[in-house]
Amino acid sequence: MKLGTRLEKIEPYSPSEYNGMIRLDANESCFDLPKEIKAEIADKIKSVEFNRYPDPYASELCDKFAAYFNIDPENVVAANGSDEILSILFGAVLDYKSTVLLASPDFSMYRFYADLYGQNTVIYNKPIMTQSDCSDLFLKAKNVDLTLFSNPCNPTSEGIDAKDILNALSETDGIIVADEAYMDFWGESIIDKIYTNKNLIVLKTCSKAFGLAAARVGFAVADKKIIEMFKKAKSPYNVSSLDQAAASVVLSHPEYLKKRTAQIISARNKLYNGLKPLLTSEMRMSEPKANFVCIHTARAVHIYEKLRKYNIAVRCPEKNILRISAGTENETETLLTTFGKVVKECDRQ
């Protein structure tokens, strides 16, 4: 039996096992849905015909999403999480061996899917804590087929101003993809600019501010021609009826979502302000734009491992980066107390 060799050099994404840990590593919402909305979801699921395939175009879900963001549903496609969007983007929307520009550090799955589908990947190494100045990145974007970045950035929690992205869009024929998974926690969305920029794709998710990580639901927003390409390439019934039902209900409560988003921002600010006095002189932390903070430190791996021994899971995506998600009030208090203790332990070693 002959197997393919493309996967041999590809680094897989490794999700954590928790076993009762405080989970501050996955950037999920720290708040579960309220029981009233869960009850509404349960009622809606009761009407699902389990013997039938889902709506192939998730029409109600796309309508609710479009209404929330004040855009046309025809410019939206729903998917089984943003990962399916990335898979379609690199595997079908782009031609094989297209040139793709990615930044580093950034979300690791971008490189994974680009490599998986045989694209030519160019990496732009960002200077630390200067995400807002991406002039060099956008200069390179003029000469590639597609440029993809998260905004705000995962894992740095920094952001690129909307005007800089729009300037770059006007200076290239290539596609620019802005992954706005964390944009609800900032204020620089360009989702409404798809009508004046045919080469813009904006990605969205229900897993962060909307508190629906358990339901794998993501969206691509773009010019109708690009959306038709996504629809042609996606699986016929890609979003389950249960996920469509849950996300449709949640998106029907815009005031709740805005209030919850504000609470998450408040939790993030408490985490950020609580960590500042605990940092040593070699540690750096920029003001966060997402629902997590990022600490640049040579001790990242050591602190990550020490925190796990205290049953606190954070993320160490690179050897000099610690990413910590906003948690509940109790989780944040525990993290701050333990982080200070761990830093002192490191000083003594």
Image (cartoon, rainbow, N blue to C red):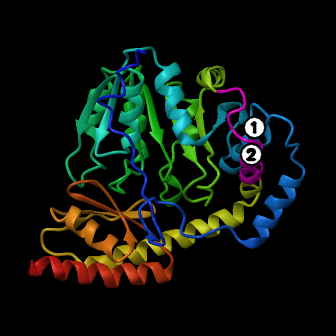
Does the segment drawn in magenta span residue 95? no
Q: From the viewer's perspective, is residue 169 above or below residue 279?
A: above
The residue wearing badge 1 is 58
Q: From the viewer's perspective, is residue 51 above or below residue 152?
A: above
- Residue at image position (28%, 35%) is 137
The residue wearing badge 2 is 244
Q: Secondary structure at mark 2?
A: helix
Spatial distance from mark 1 to mark 2, Cα to Cα? Answer: 7 Å
- Residue at image position (31%, 74%) is 309
Identified by mark 2, the residue type is: Gln
Q: From the viewer's perspective, is residue 23 above or below residue 96?
A: below
Q: Residues within 10 Å of mark 2 (few under 14, many from 20)?
A: many
Between discs 1 and 2, the one toward the N terminus: 1
- Left or right for 251, reference 134: right
> Residue 166 in the image: x percent, y percent?
43, 36
Is the C-beta separation of discs 1 and 2 under 8 Å? yes
Q: Determine which quarter of the picture holds residue 220.
A: top right
Q: Determine which quarter of the picture holds residue 208.
A: bottom right
Count of numbered badges drawn on the protein: 2
Q: Secondary structure at mark 1?
A: loop
